Amino acid sequence: MSKKRSGGGLSATQQAAKFLGVSVLSGAVLAGIALPAVGALGLAAKGSVESFDELPANLKTPPLSQRTTILDAKGGTIATVYSRDRTVVELKDISPYMQKAIVAIEDSRFYQHGAVDLKGVLRALNQNAQSGGVAQGASTLTQQYVKNVFVEEAGDDPTKVAQATQQTIGRKIRELKYAIQVEEELGKKKILENYLNITFFGQQAYGVEAAAQRYFSTSAKDLTLAQSALLAGIVQSPSRYDPVNDEAEATKRRNVVLQRMAEVGDISRAEAAKAQKEKLGLKVSQPKNGCITAVKGASFFCKYVEAVFKSDPVFGKTKEERAKIWNQGGLTIKTTLDPQAQDSVQASLKEHVYKSDKVAAAATLVEPGTGKIVGMGQSKPFGYGKNETEINYSVNYSMGGSNFGFPTGSTFKPFVAAAALEEGRPADQEYSSPYQMEYPSPVQTCDSKPWVNTRGEKLENESESEKGPYRLRKAMELSVNTYFVQMISDIGLCPVVNMTNKLQVVQGNGDKLPEVPAIALGSKGISPLTMATAYAAFAARGMYCTPVAIESITQKVGQQQKSLEVPKSTCSRAMSETTADTINQLLKGVVDSGTGKTAGLSDRDNAGKTGTTDSRKNAWFVGYTPNLSGAVWVGSASQKVEMKNIYIGGEYNSLVYGGQVPGPIWKDAMTGALAGKDAPGFNFVDIPEDNPDRGDGDGNGNGNGNGNGNGNGDGDNGDGNGNNGGTGDGGTDGGTFPTPTFSIPENLFQGNNGNGGRNG
């Protein structure tokens, strides 16, 4: 840093002269500052000189923010996102016409002067004196570049932007100091390249490459003379000379640029005259920014990727650090999304649930053994209009999902069975499973205080014909409530909680599941991604892998590319192979002859579980093959719609069951996603049959199709944490399914009363 002058150096006249060379010559006239006489500057001039000498010598230039491209697993573009639409290019990739046009109109003596153009300043002073105002400025291209650096550094902070553009002598002095440094360090060609990449051309286009694409759908290197003149003319006032909104004004400005190019000898007058006669020839490309523009219905997955980036510490220790990198952009993010699977998910959702329906559907597909999310979609598209939503029903609240997730009903029962098997219960475990019973009490928890049914509350199965004894296989196929409540009473709540912890099954708001018997019946709200990932552990023979959406990221900083570290899936053993194999065999029975028979795949091994909650406000199907797991939820995000006597996807449903609406969605989505893929089989486990005299149903509603999922969020605006238990999962083999009449007391489930929120 230069030493401060202690006096006795410059005379007042010299100080004023230097001030003119520093402040006025740097373009202070643009601020409208009146300079009637040198002597009138006085101490203000002296202070400005000292400030100039004390400024740091080095200009810190932030990396230019650029667009980020999000790709699917095959390299296809899903969406582009950016805080500023910019693609940095080298000078050799910018049309010579463009280079000459910007210099001619903005700083025609660019190659003859240094950081300050003395002749230009004197000319500006003369013009301004004659006009009595500020008719002409004198900032050089280098000074304009420095100002743009300050604006870029300010980002989207309005206060910092105002400071970077304020019309003061102090800013002009600072601009000049750095302009001198830039001239010495970069040279003219690099300054021109940087200027053309940083400056704003209107219509959300930053830099000449984005501008060429926006206005002419071409690249910067292919710009013609007339096109270059138009873009160069826009820079002075992007709003005034916007060719999209004011073609006449933009044409006049373009012709001024062409005339100036002829005057300085860049082109002949004949070339200028010919170009002036041309029409603008706009071929506008609309700005396509953000996940709302994503292809293949992948907007919600795109937003999930953004949420992962902004929340995962691998991308920065603090929220601010991660946001800064995201906004800087220049990222190429290759994701796990499989285009075949995504197409299949969207096609199935569109076929079975209309966006105008009273209810919505969400589906997520996950690869067992890797945690890769290969498909994610929902029936109501991303947006802010009617029958649209910005809420991703497939994920937790922290990642852009609903407040609490959605009650899962009987799809929770396999977790209870897995816990029991891990505790040593046999695969043919039998319980009395009466039609109706009191909740067993006490039930052991993870601490010394057991859960107690202090009010003697009861639960029942959906049909009176459903009464035991049942063994595990048949109880799972029919989804018998009383069986699984007896099972959780037998083993205690702690093994179930330990199992769900290993499978990272949490509520949609991130809270752990409570230690109450009602969790056996799916009373708590959970997201489809959580369920699909947990079931994937069954398919992977007990190995749970955390979900991942990003495979790799490269970042472009200037002309350099660097790779960024990305989150990796962490796999751990959640249960023994034998337990997982047994669950697979049990859930095969559900799709072979149980409540999920209509969802079963015919060309490969598959397994799954249905779920339907109280008042039929939620219906689920979660299933898998050895190489793909998927969860489908159907219901009202606000938990206000009871799916009775309802049209969904143009089809009338007197009562909605997990195997009836979610099941076919899952079947079609999985069929398309797995087309042409290997069809490995599960490891066979021999599970003894129930009493062969016990049939699967009599065709009158007394067989397949009942398993009663529970808890649904009865609050008016809730989304999945209600207090009441209820009925569930009917299959489709029986004829008529009675509407349950029992209720479970409010304090039994210890829920959140269906708290309202953002997923309405």
Image: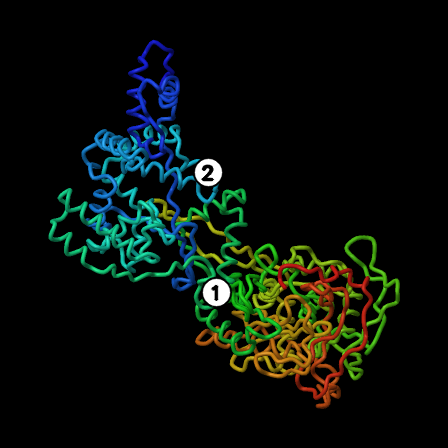
The C terminus sits in image quarter: bottom right
Disc 1 versus disc 2: distance between alpha carbons? 35 Å
Classify residue 254 as left or right of residue 623: left
**Residue 485 appears at what percent x and percent y?**
78, 69
Give whichever of 13, 388 is nearer the camera. 13
Percent from the top left, x then y, of residue 149? 37, 39
Specify the label residue 160 is tagged with: 2
408 w.r.t. 466: above or below: above
Q: Is residue 574 above or below residue 659?
A: above
Residue type at numbered disc 2: Lys
Q: Which of the numbered marks, if any, corresponds to residue 451? A: none
Residue 114 is drawn in which quadrant? Answer: top left
Mark 1: which secondary structure? loop
595 lies left or right of 287: right
Residue that sits furthest to the top in the current view? 8
Disc 2 on helix, strand or loop? helix
Please name the residue shown 28% across and 53% down the image: 250
The residue located at (34%, 36%) in the rendering is: 146
Q: Position of residue 722 (x, y in %)?
A: 73, 64
**Residue 662, quarter of picture:** bottom right
Q: Name the residue under label 1.
A: 298
The amino acid at mark 1 is Ala
Residue at left offset 37%, top offset 37%:
61
In this rendering, position of residue 369 left or right of residue 83: right
Mark 2, residues whose alpha carbon is within 10 Å: few (<14), some, or many (≥20)?
A: some
Quadrant of the snapshot with the N terminus: top left
126 sits left or right of 671 in the view: left
